[in-house]
Amino acid sequence: MPNKKQVSIAQLKVGIFVTISLLLLAFLILQQSWGIQWFSRKAKVMTFLPDVAGLKEGAPVWLAGIEIGRVRKVAIVPPRSMQGMSPFFVKSPK
């Protein structure tokens, strides 16, 4: 018959294992359900467009039918600051 100290150490090990497993499961569920991608590379990209009717902060950004990000900021700039700029993506410095 095992003594009480051995039983309590075994219970402690099982408890720690179950706790870590539940935390890992919760982490994976949140990552999948909220679309959080902690281990993916990110790039800050700007674009200058002549017409952005209906564009709002937080709107999804789609490329070739795949959601690649979200709009973080919408700003109006003077037309002269866009001279010579093409209406395509420009990778901005971080």
Image: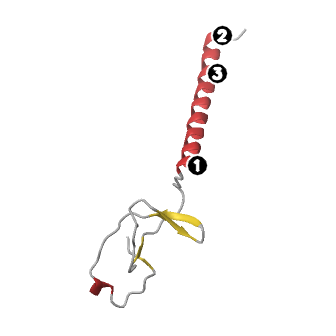
Which image quadrant: the C terminus? bottom left
Amino acid beneath label 2 = Asn
> Relative to the observer, which residue lies in front, 31 or 79?
79
Q: Secondary structure at mark 2?
A: loop
Q: Find the distance from the CA under tag 2 to the CA under tag 3.
A: 11 Å
Amino acid beneath label 3 = Ala
Amino acid beneath label 1 = Gln
Quarter-of-image position of residue 65: bottom right
Residue under label 2: 3
Q: Residue furthest right?
A: 1
First in sequence: mark 3 vs mark 1: 3
Q: Is residue 1 shown above or below 72?
A: above
Residue under label 1: 32
Residue drawn at x 44%, y 61% is 59
Residue under label 3: 10
Q: How is the image coloured?
A: secondary structure
